Image: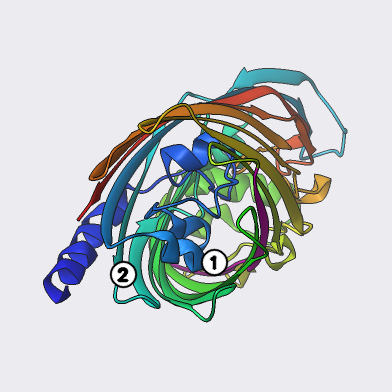
Amino acid sequence: MKKKVLAFAAAAVLMAPQMVGAEGFAIYEWSAEGLAMGGARMFAENDAANLAYNPASITKVKGEAFKVSATYLSPHGKYDAQEANPFNGNPTRRTISGHNRVHPAWAPGMYYVRQINDKEWFGMGTWSRFGMVSQFERDSMAGTNAFSSKLNGVSLAANYARKLDKKWTASLGAEVNYVGLQLDKNAYGVSPLHVEGESYALGWNAAANYTFDDKNEMGLVYRSKINHSMEADYDMHNSKSLAAVMAMKGLAVDPTKVPNSIYGDAYGFVTLPESIDLGYSHKFNDKTRVEARYTWTRWERYAALDMDFSSFPGPQPSYKGWSNGQRFALGLEHKFSDKYTGMIGYAHDKSSIPYDGGDFMIPTGTRTTYSIGAQYHDKKQTLAVALGWMNVGSLDFAGGGLIANAHTRDSYTKIASISYQRNF
């Protein structure tokens, strides 16, 4: 077992730099079956990905199981931005429309679960809980706010689970969370700024399941907040033009004393929020069951993204002020035979982004996902595929800088996923 755990950890480290998410900040597509059921998959039988959805349910894995998953996400969308005059206070000059550049991403997952004895289980997994990517043309109106934003996030978690009695199971786990952040903007349309950094931080989780009878089960999962202190590098070019713009705005900046290119270190602090999942499963019979899942995320933790630049006096604040998030998911699973299962899902994830805290980094409104999938399984292996379509609602936000206000529209994400599990 020790050799398998070490090999798993090494593979997870190699996967980490490739982890990326789709439009939005929180990621819930952790396996093909999970996507197919809208994320409402907290009580699956003999599924190693339970480690991600509900670690107390890894007690449903028989013996030893290893699972890999790959999810493809392709975001699309358009926007309208009203241009502000930064010099004389004129509220608008013109409205400019554009669209985000399609920048598909892969979100892999990997899970290993081992039954130690009749009462104890151990699991290890790596998957993306947070991530986003948005791309706009460098010279576009959106580019003055953010023309490229990437948050590559991956979690490596280890959990111990135990059957306490015939009705209760519980789990406790630790998590190492990696975040790679890359931000690019064309400040005031004249000065390209690039910031890139990474951070590792620790978190923990706890979960419990209660079985009412052979048809009904309830579970609760808590995941802690994770505090990231990030060290980054930045470079800014054409700085004299930016200084000239700032001087015209009345700021105490002397363009003659500013170099044309600036390089240095940047420091930032951000808290990824804690969350609570409450799930319920009901079996109509041996073939059909339904799951419901409610997720509460304390997005108010994401109050600001402040960066300290070594060559700039004081922090450069970026107000967020998000509200706490609520997500509802419903999934249905039906066994057509001993080897084939079908799944459908629905999820509704209300936007937490306020008007004054929105930007082109994460231009995401309320997300509604419709999904479908199928699974083949025998005694040794499981293969699943799923398709999803996410309607990303419109969002209105202030923008700042050269942008008086902005409106995103016609936004959606296409999702496809495949998973393979081997039982030993």
**Secondary structure beneath label 1:** loop
Q: Is residue 225 visible?
A: no
> Residue farthest to the bottom?
164
**110 is within the stretch colored magenta:** no
**Does residue 128 sit above or below 105 in this rendering?**
below
Q: Quadrant of the N terminus?
A: bottom left
Residue 262 on image: x %, y %:
41, 56
Distance from label 2 to label 1 (Cα)?
55 Å
Which residue is at a point 52% across and 61% down the rendered structure image?
54
Q: Is residue 49 visible?
A: yes
Lower sequence index among marks 2 and 1: 2
Amino acid found under the numbered disc labelled 1: Phe
Front-most of 38 and 90?
38
Amino acid found under the numbered disc labelled 2: Gln
Q: Quadrant of the C terminus?
A: bottom left
**Does residue 177 sit above or below 259 in this rendering?**
below
User: Range of the magenta residues?
Assistant: 265-283
- The residue labelled by disc 2 is 115
Which residue is at a point 45% across and 57% down the rendered structure image?
50
- The residue labelled by disc 1 is 312
Residue 132 on image: x %, y %:
51, 44
**Does residue 244 sit above or below 225 in this rendering?**
above
Q: Residues within 10 Å of mark 2 (few under 14, many from 20)?
A: many
Disc on res. 106: none
Front-most of 226 and 371?
371
State whether the magenta stretch is mostly helix, strand or loop. strand
